[in-house]
Image: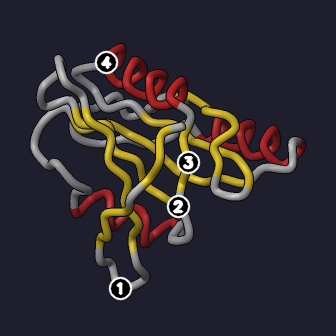
């Protein structure tokens, strides 16, 4: 089970609120299922319905994670309206990228006064499975 520090949850929500009405995006890295570092990245498409992590920022995060002995645990992004789970575009992006052994964290801002965080996995068949996680 994925374990996320409360400060990382708070940072993801703050990032989402700061980027509103556009989607935010980023990466959580760590070891043994425990998040150690949150990388807030730029959504290069600056869209309220899509995200794409800046490729250079993704490479920088990967190099930093490797240097610290961490691996990517999750990609995160926000939904500001519409889907309360992963969208068909999110699933297609996961399948196209091959990142299927990772969590997808979704910050829901449908009610900005009460943001929610959900975790999912995408199977190789394109099924979305909601996953439990623990805030520590």
Q: Which of 87 and 30 is in front in this view?
A: 30
Q: Which of 78 and 116 is in front in this view?
A: 116
Residues at marks 3 and 2, CA–CA distance in whole angstroms: 6 Å
Q: State whether residue 98 is above or below residue 108.
A: below
Closer to viewer: mark 1 or mark 2: 2
Q: Which badge, 1 or 4, comes first in the chain's sequence? A: 4
Q: Which badge, 4 or 3, comes first in the chain's sequence? A: 3
At 81% across and 38% down in the image, what residue appears?
64
| Element type where label 3 sits in the image | strand
Q: Which badge, 3 or 1, comes first in the chain's sequence? A: 3
Callout 4 crowding tier (Cα within 10 Å): few <14, some 14–19, many ≥20: many
Measured from the top left, where is residue 119 in percent x and y?
Answer: 37, 53
In the picture of the structure, the residue carrying the numbered disc 2 is 1
**Residue occupying the far front of the picture:** 136
In the picture of the structure, the residue carrying the numbered disc 3 is 3
Closer to viewer: mark 2 or mark 4: 2
Proximity of marks 3 and 2: CB atoms separated by less than 8 Å: yes
Callout 3 crowding tier (Cα within 10 Å): few <14, some 14–19, many ≥20: some
| Element type where label 1 sits in the image | loop
In the picture of the structure, the residue carrying the numbered disc 4 is 17
Q: State whether residue 56 is above or below residue 98.
A: above
In the picture of the structure, the residue carrying the numbered disc 1 is 125
Q: Nearer the viewer, residue 124 or 8?
A: 8
| Element type where label 4 sits in the image | helix
Residues at marks 1 and 4, CA–CA distance in whole angstroms: 32 Å
User: From the viewer's perspective, is 91 left or right of 58?
Assistant: left
User: From the viewer's perspective, is 48 left or right of 25?
Assistant: left
At 37% across and 62% down in the image, what residue appears?
131
Measured from the top left, where is residue 17 in percent x and y?
Answer: 31, 18
Q: Which badge, 1 or 2, comes first in the chain's sequence? A: 2
Q: Nearer the viewer, residue 120 or 98?
A: 120
């Amino acid at each position: 089970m994925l374990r996320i520090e409360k400060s990382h949850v708070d940072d993801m929500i703050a990032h989402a609120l700061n980027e509103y009405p556009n989607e935010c995006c980023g990466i959580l890295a760590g070891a043994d299922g425990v998040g150690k570092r949150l990388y807030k990245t730029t959504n290069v498409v600056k869209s309220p319905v899509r995200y794409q992590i800046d490729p250079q920022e993704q490479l920088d995060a990967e190099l930093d994670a490797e240097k610290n002995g961490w691996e990517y645990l999750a990609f995160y992004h926000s939904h500001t309206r519409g889907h309360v789970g992963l969208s068909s575009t999110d699933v297609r992006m996961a399948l196209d990228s091959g990142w299927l052994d990772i969590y997808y964290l979704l910050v829901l801002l449908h009610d900005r006064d009460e943001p929610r965080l959900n975790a999912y996995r995408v199977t190789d068949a394109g099924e979305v499975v909601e996953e439990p996680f623990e805030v520590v």
